[in-house]
């Protein structure tokens, strides 16, 4: 299982480095990819997750993993370009898979075909489609039949928000709340992005001008709703409509922050959604492309948005929970309980080592009061 790799101390240490070392932020992405639409600080981390996922799917040899991780860390530290890192990762996967399969000569046609067949079988035929979702629903979904839209939500309120925006002729977010389907992808990195901006209609609502604000990703409520407030002001929303919209936004925000956010993914077997034809394997085997190019074609994402209307039994579903890039804000609440540290005996000495005059005077009046009270009691007063 993937957890066996992600829970290792050496993996956790590198994840920490990927989250805190600015070297890995703003990775240079030249190719035409939907990742460019998102804030790129997280891309190195999600690419690392994707690589561990591929290693487990294709190589799955715990005894080779130490050396694989070492070479992977060197690759990340040496190269900044996204495409070059992906190419390097694929070469590492080829190298370690051939070692695990005891293949020594990939120039040999038979061994080359064995390797290609292995990649095809493990990653495509036995592989997964992935659904990114909000961590709020992890505990709700575990052990249940996976059905579209069958989880706690504020859809009726969101429909009301849609109607408000229609009044001002602003088509803000396109979401059919009556539709019952789940969206899957075979792109692990994109699934990570889907998770952290989930639900996407809410993210779109908070970013009406599509400027990729990061307040939502960084758990900053006031920053997250600023673009929406500005948008409603610019379109002359009435005060009552503004309050209605922001009320729904706050309810959804509170729901999505009931638990600390993680990268939450649902994995379902690829074969439970579609058939992977053996004829396609024949195309890969007979291709005139180099081995690296054939493997690249096998591993590259092919389905960014597969809408599935069927339900899935619990034994078809795996839930994977990974660290989010942005830490949840720590809110320190002052406790009302009594704390002995707050009860301090006053200093008896001043800075010169002398007994404080105020302390002497205070003690005198306290003593005088006690004596006066005793005298009054003795006199029967």
Image (cartoon, helix red, strand yellow):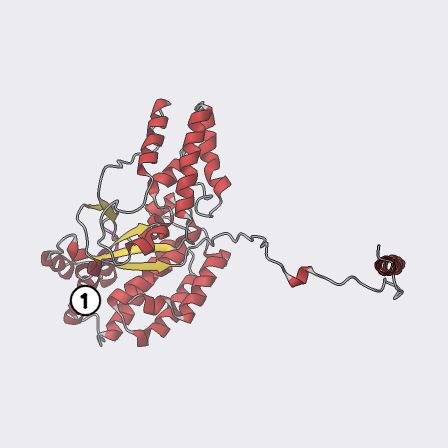
Out of 315 and 52, give the one closest to the viewer.
315
Front one among 293 and 3: 3
Q: Is 300 included in the stretch rendered in magenta?
A: yes
Q: Which residue is mark 1?
A: 118
Judge whether residue 299 can be spotted in this image: yes
- Residue at image location 36% in from the left, 66% down from the top: 6
Q: Is residue 292 left or right of residue 158?
A: left
Q: Which residues are magenta?
A: 297-301
Asked if one can make out residue 81 in the rendered structure from this viewpoint, the answer is no
- Residue 27 location (% of width, % of height): 42, 52
**Residue name at image x 33 percent, y 62 percent:** 51
Q: Position of residue 281 (x, y in %)?
A: 13, 59
- Total labels drawn: 1
Residue ID at (43%, 35%): 247
Snapshot quadrant of residue 175: top left
Residue 273 higher or lower than 175, as above or below: below
């Amino acid at each position: 299982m993937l957890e066996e790799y992600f829970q290792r101390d050496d993996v956790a240490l590198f994840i920490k480095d990927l989250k805190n070392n600015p070297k890995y932020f703003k990775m240079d992405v030249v190719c035409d990819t939907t990742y460019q639409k998102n804030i790129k600080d997280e891309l190195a981390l999600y690419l690392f997750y994707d690589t561990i996922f591929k290693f487990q799917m294709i190589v799955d040899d715990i005894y080779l993993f130490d050396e694989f991780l070492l070479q992977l860390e060197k690759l990340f530290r040496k190269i900044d370009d996204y495409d070059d890192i992906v190419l390097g990762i694929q070469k590492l996967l080829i190298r370690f898979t051939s070692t695990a399969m005891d293949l020594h000569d990939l120039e040999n046609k038979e061994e080359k075909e064995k390797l290609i067949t292995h990649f095809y079988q493990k990653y495509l035929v036995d592989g997964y489609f992935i659904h990114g979702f909000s961590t709020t629903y992890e505990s709700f979904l575990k052990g249940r039949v996976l059905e579209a839209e069958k989880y706690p939500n504020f859809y009726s309120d969101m429909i009301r928000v849609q109607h408000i925006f229609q009044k001002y002729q602003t088509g803000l977010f396109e979401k059919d709340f009556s539709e019952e389907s789940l969206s899957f992808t075979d792109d692990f990195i994109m699934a990570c992005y889907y998770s952290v901006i989930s639900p996407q209609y809410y993210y779109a609502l908070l970013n009406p001008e599509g400027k990729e604000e990061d307040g939502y990703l960084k758990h900053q409520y006031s920053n997250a709703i600023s673009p929406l407030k500005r948008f409603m002001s610019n379109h002359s929303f009435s005060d009552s409509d503004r309050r209605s919209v922001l009320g729904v936004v706050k309810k959804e925000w509170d729901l999505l922050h009931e638990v600390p956010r993680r990268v939450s993914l649902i994995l379902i077997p690829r074969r439970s959604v579609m058939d992977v034809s053996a004829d396609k394997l024949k195309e890969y085997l007979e291709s005139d492309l180099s081995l690296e190019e054939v493997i690249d074609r096998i591993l590259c994402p092919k389905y960014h948005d597969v809408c599935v209307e069927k339900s899935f039994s619990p034994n078809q579903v795996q839930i994977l929970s990974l660290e989010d890039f942005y830490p949840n804000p720590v809110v320190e609440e002052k406790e009302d309980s009594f704390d002995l540290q707050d009860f301090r005996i006053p200093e008896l000495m001043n800075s010169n080592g002398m007994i404080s005059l105020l302390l002497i005077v205070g003690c005198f009046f306290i003593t005088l009061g006690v004596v006066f009270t005793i005298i009054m009691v003795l006199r029967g007063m």
